[in-house]
Image: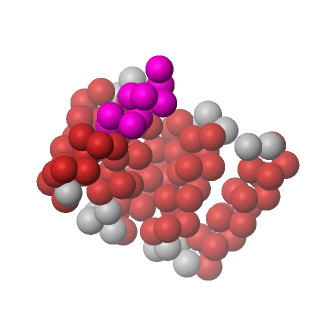
Amino acid sequence: MTTKKSLMLMKAAEEVLRLDPKNVKTWSDLGKIRDKQKDYKGAADAYEKAVEFYPFDDSVWLKLGKIRVKLMDYKGAAEAFEKAAKILPGRLNTGIASWMQERN
């Protein structure tokens, strides 16, 4: 993602959140933007906000777990993966497997 494009997307997301601070989709989008910028702490913060407002989305828990691995917070990652697994058990293995392939 280009710096100019990512800055525009981040500013747009921040404006949406200023107007609607409980917008789960935008918190998740902001997490993705920050992850692509390698701002893993910022990404974790955004995903944590998303699950704070809507804790029933396994995909956001999975993204949070992946970010926590990047932050070497393995206990936090395991907790996020466990929450994802409780929401939709079969999907967790697929999500982790595809992520592992991306890393190799």
Instruction: Please identify the residue farthest to the right as the structure is shown.
Output: 4
Write the residue at 56% across / 49% down: 32
Write the residue at 33% across / 34% down: 97
Q: Is residue 92 above or below residue 98?
A: below
Colour mode? secondary structure
Q: How far across and how far down the image is residue 23, in percent? A: 49, 73
Instruction: Please identify the residue farthest to the top as the structure is shown.
Output: 104
- Which quarter of the image is occupied by the N terminus? top right
Is residue 36 found inside the magenta-colored segment of the image? no
| Residue 22 visible in this rendered orientation of the protein | yes
The quarter of the displayed image where residue 54 is located: bottom left
Write the residue at 38% across / 55% down: 60
The quarter of the displayed image where residue 67 is located: top left
All told, the count of numbered labels is 0
The residue segment tinted magenta is 96-104
Q: How far across and how far down the image is residue 10, in percent? A: 70, 56
Instruction: Please identify the residue farthest to the bottom as the structure is shown.
Output: 19
Drawn side of residue 9 relative to residue 76, left or right:
right
Q: How far across and how far down the image is residue 55, in percent? A: 28, 63
The rendered magenta stretch, by its main secondary structure, is classed as helix
Write the residue at 65% across / 64% down: 13
Q: Judge by depth and name the residue closer to the eye, 79 or 45.
A: 79
The quarter of the displayed image where residue 64 is located: top left
Q: How far across and how far down the image is residue 79, in percent? A: 22, 41
